[in-house]
Amino acid sequence: MVGDMILSVNKDTLIGSSYDSAASLLKQTEGIITLVVCNPKRDTQLDGSVISKDLDKKMSGTDGATTSTLEPSTLLEEPIDPLTSPIKPGRECTIEINKDKMGLGLSIVGGCDTLLGVIIVHEIFSDGAAAKDGRLKPGDQILEVNSEDFRSIPHKKALTALRQTPSKITMVVYRDESIANSAISGKEEDFLDVIEVELMKKPGKGLGLSIVGRKNGNGIFISDIVPGGAAGVDGRLMKGDQILSVMGQDLKNATQEEAAAVLKLATGKVSIKLGRLKARPSPSTSDNESLTSESDTLACRSVVLKRGSKGFGFSIVGGYGSLHGNIPIYVKSVFEDACKNVLHTGDQIIAVDGIKLQGRTHQEAVLILKNADNIVTLKILS
């Protein structure tokens, strides 16, 4: 299948081989070719075993073996042209886009310092180079830009890198298969993880967030979150979230002025339904989440906590497969005075006593904290 990794050909290993050396080896093989292949994404190989298939020039139905009449050279995939090749779902693709006078013409959300964890294309502007190129879509994950790694990069650093790109941009992108399949329906809701929150709006104060309309088309989005405000304290909202409804009132087709009026008039417990672009990290992103640049590493700090009668004095939110999507583990609330000077709502927990939490479910993170020693060291990204 497309995406299978070829580990060896007739007992000659290809691990670490270049494209040219692998192509040369495959072209030189004759007769029966035994390939050892694996695919980490394939659900049928849950035990981690390696699939071995014999490829012969004659069809054979014995023992359910898979055979092929292809010549060895036809097993090769020719190098693709990044200027014209399409983005294929479920695999990393390299594309090239030439900027015009209107620039690249897209907006992004996410980053390693946000609830998304990765950089996602948020909107494609109709007058920009990306729209004219026609391949990028909202929801695509940006992995590299001109050889700069975007797999674990803060939002502001990604913005700066995109703004400083030359006229020719080479990007490595990943489109999740589930997002690609939902695009067939044409319903924008299928691209979103729906999140419902309740914020307490105090008399005379707002919700602590700013909104903006989409440049092309309908939609109201969170453009900023005020630190210390109701939205910031809750910790579940982020820039780029679409506001689908407030107190049951549908805002999917509302103007920015209409949405601002609804938010302003709401009082007490304000229920908000949000839509967030689905973001399942690509395989390489999951493998490289721990590989951060020197500047990113400096942003992390270590916190030592002692277990008390109420545990370590804080609660967590997030995790892979959580109700809020596939997001990192964050501090939800801090309820012990001893913790309030070192932990804050929204801090990302990178590791617990050296155990990395990237890719962990919420339940796994809870168990790691529960089973930790009475004195625990947390690696925190604020």
Image: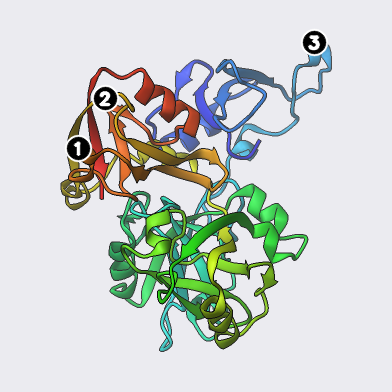
**Location of residue 349 in the rendering, given as x and y in whole percent from the top left corner:** 32, 39
Circle 3/circle 2 CB separation < 8 Å:
no
Figure quadrant of residue 328: top left
- Residue annotated with mark 2: 308
From the viewer's perspective, is residue 254 above or below residue 148? below
- Residue annotated with mark 3: 63
Q: Residues within 10 Å of mark 3 (few under 14, many from 20)?
A: few
Give amino acid for label 1: Ala
Q: Residue furthest front?
A: 203
Quadrant containing the N terminus in the rendered view:
top right
* Mark sitting earlier along the chain (3/2): 3
From the viewer's perspective, is residue 103 above or below residue 1? below
- Residue annotated with mark 1: 338
- Distance between mark 2 and mark 1 Cα atoms: 10 Å
Q: Residue at x 38, y 38 (%)?
A: 315
Left or right: 2 as drawn, with respect to 96: right
Q: Residue at x 41, y 77 (%)?
A: 204
Give amino acid for label 3: Asp
The answer to whether residue 349 of the structure is visible from this angle is: yes
